[in-house]
Image (cartoon, rainbow, N blue to C red):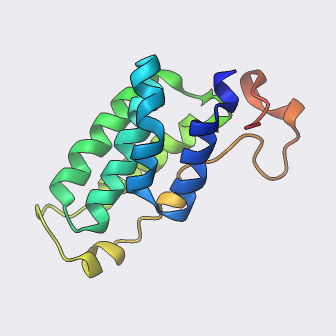
Amino acid sequence: MTQGHPAYRRYLDLFQKGEYRACHDVLEPLWLETRSGFYQGLIQLAVAFLHLSNGNTAGARKLLLRAHQHLEPYAPFHQGLDVEKLLKGVRESLDRLPEAQQITAEEAASLGIEPARILVRCPPDGLTRAECPSGEDGIR
């Protein structure tokens, strides 16, 4: 079952820890196997935040836009992930990015962008598995 695929679960854990390069590395083989736009969007999301952590706002913007494009068809929920909240977080991150192509890592850290808050698993706190929309039952 893909929802519980170990590479996908590992990606989610790594993303929460801010290990964006490792996110790419762990999910890429699954994307190459499936060619899923969902996995491609998640990879692009991680690489966008890797760029941002290095102050590369141009690269972050480009990949956030691509990630949004790839993930949008999977809203509102997919594979135990609240894609609608993820897309909202991507849009908010784009709004916070300065126009400059490059900033310092310190400036990037001060933008108030919190990538770990973007990926919300279903069921979120306060919901039971039965209450998850679209029959999603969380990450296994």
Give me the residue at 29% from left, 35% from top. 66
- Does 51 sit above or below residue 9? below
Is 106 positioned to the left or the right of 70 in the image?
left
Give me the residue at 43% from left, 53% from top. 22
Give me the residue at 26% from left, 58% from top. 51
- Does 49 sit above or below residue 124? below
Quarter of the figure with the C terminus: top right
Front-lying residue, 131 or 26: 26
Quarter of the figure with the N terminus: top right
Give me the residue at 86% from left, 35% from top. 129
- Does 86 sit above or below residue 137? below
For residue 28, what is the image quadrant? top left
For residue 84, what is the image quadrant? top right
Where does residue 83 sit, x and y in percent of width and height? 55, 35
Where does residue 107 sit, x and y in percent of width and height? 26, 78
* Res. 71 visible in picture: no
Check the image and name the residue furthest to the bottom. Answer: 106
Is 87 positioned to the left or the right of 110 in the image?
right
Front-lying residue, 16 or 118: 16
